[in-house]
Image (spheres, rainbow, N blue to C red):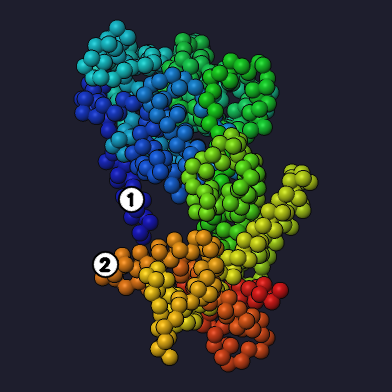
Amino acid sequence: MDILKKIEQFREEEQRLKWEGTFAEYLEVLKEKPWVAQSAHSRVYNMVKDAGIEEEDGKRKYKFFDHQLFGLEEALERLVEEYFHPAAKRLDVRKRILLLMGPVSGGKSTLVSMLKRGLETYSHTERGEVFAIKGCPMHEDPLHLIPHHLREDFFDEYGVRIEGNLSPLNMMRLQEEYGGRIEDVRVERIFFSEDKRVGIGTFSPSDPKSQDIADLTGSIDFSTIAEFGSESDPRAYRFDGELNKANRGMMEFQEMLKCDEKFLWHLLSLTQEGNFKAGRFALISADELIIAHTNETEYRSFIANKKNEALHSRIIVMPVPYNLRVSEEERIYAKMIKESDVRDVHIAPHTFKVAAMFTILTRLKAPKKGDVDIIKKMRLYDGESVEGFNSVDVEELKKEYQDEGMSGIDPRYVINRISSTIIRKENPAINALDVLRSLKDGLEHHSSISNEDRERYLNFISIARREYDDIAKKEVQKAFVYSYEESAKTLMDNYLDNVEAYCNKNKLRDPLTGEEMNPDEKLMRSIEEQIGISENAKKAFREEILIRISAYARKGRRFDYNSHERLREAIQKKLFADLKDVVKITTSSKTPDEQQLKKVNEVVARLIDEHGYNSTSANELLRYVGSLLNR
């Protein structure tokens, strides 16, 4: 019954939002809410802006695109700031067709779909209200009723500019139904809906020989010619083409560059002049955002054709490359799996991450700078700190290739291989190794990949496997160290005592003999070397630790095992190195003794409770790490 109540509430809300009145009453609404007269481009921009904007590192992130598009922040910022924003200000950019150009499965269709669904929702809000002449099949702007000679006076009074002419149908209706009295023309609030063909349209070209221009501009209704007496009578015309129905909102032009030329010239007229030709009528005004999408190959072919020069100059191309961040690619896979019927299957931690590493590596171009390899580049792009590099280096890397992200493995291929792994595996869990194996098998049968790329991609699978080996060892390391938590704390306290003595140039006292002794340099270095602290950097690192201890003391807090992330990592690695033999025996023994079994169960419980594994994937991880350590 809950869903039925919600349906009823939605119906009641739609009734509440409906509005109908005369043109004179509409002008009162306009005085109170001047934004209701905004253009289609302005409405799209305000919809995106009203959803919220976050500033981070001098870059803007638009919340409108959250949870659907990942890793495309730069492309989306460029789209909003270089197209939607200036178009909303009535600058010349609004007289261009927006063409999204990028690789397959890069998010172009999702982006367009989000804009369409967003407009539907936005038209139900106060800020997104849209009003139209009642009974008009094109949902015409009521302000077109204002005669041209009065439009300057209207601007002075209302601050709203009017563009476009009254359509032939409404011009006739104004005289015949309202006796020329503009103020009496009925106006209603409309709600965008692609399903109901109100304010949102989609055009997909078919066979050029059979496709009719009427699909775009409408057609004559021959059954009414006898009634109205002429083909040029607007009442005998069906204003039901996609350009008619998308008026006031937006139209998606799928595979635009595959379309016949006569269709494209209608788009040129609409975007450049704000009108199009239909039937035996004067030019028909329309206000809509035309958005198309294509891939790079088709676009290059299009601009190479000299016949398309005029059209090319009236198109704004917005590149939509693949995501180049591992963490964002993980979110894409998680979203796709969540939307499927296998969302209840257990996917071990780091499975998506390792698959994403492979995918991102296929999209990156080899760095030109000799001091950075492709692994470091991948990490830097994902926001990880890499010693010796900063944000300036990242920006320089991005400038090396303008077309980076326009090629490589697409998300659909990876999710297909993950899906195949889920279906084939008998136990209720899949892990990173399962997916890497599946990705490798898939490459053998991927017909569109060249032999050169296949070899390169197989190498990336090997790199992703090595990365997973490190991740797996760290996971088990953390779980084992937790089981030896007291040992870890003792080791850290011992290290801190030595660091304090070293920095203060003091001696330590032997707890058994009471004699004074120098700080244990061997112990300190054995820990610091675990995280790559060089001989030259050891003094600075130790002083940093001492400063942190003092800062904690001033605030009345105790410096403990979790107070310094790098030190904790070093302690864990040192303890794990010392415990390596224990781990090997415990994870690889076919018949563990009681003590070993207890330790394994503790580690498995830790992996399940703290790290997100289930019993199957935790035991698989332990066996795998045991095999790595025994090599």
Question: What residue sits 33% from the left and 17% below the top?
Answer: 162
Q: Which mark is residue 75?
A: none
Identify which amino acid the numbered label 1 is placed on.
Glu
Q: What is the distance, in whole Å, between disc 2 and disc 1 at their CAs?
A: 61 Å
The quarter of the picture where the N terminus appears is bottom left
Residue 304 point in image, percent of width and height: 68, 22
Q: Is residue 124 toward the left or the right of residue 100 in the image?
A: left
Residue 601 point in image, percent of width and height: 54, 83
Whether tag 2 and tag 1 are in contact, CB under 8 A, the answer is no
Q: Is residue 237 toward the left or the right of residue 560 in the image?
A: right
Which of the two residues, 14 or 110, is positioned nearer the viewer here?
A: 110
Residue 424 point in image, percent of width and height: 68, 65
Q: Residue furthest top?
A: 149
Q: Which mark is residue 554?
A: 2
| Residue 248 placement: quadrant | top left
The quarter of the picture where the C terminus appears is bottom right
Residue 396 visible in image? yes
* Residue 254 against residue 410 in the figure, above or below: above
Identify which amino acid the numbered label 2 is placed on.
Arg
| N-term mark: 2 or 1 | 1
* Residue 186 against residue 456 in the figure, above or below: above
Q: Residues within 10 Å of mark 2 (few under 14, many from 20)?
A: few
Question: What residue sits 77% from the left and 53% below the top?
Answer: 444
Q: Which mark is residue 8?
A: 1
Which of the two residues, 356 or 581, is positioned nearer the viewer here?
A: 581
Q: Secondary structure at mark 1?
A: helix
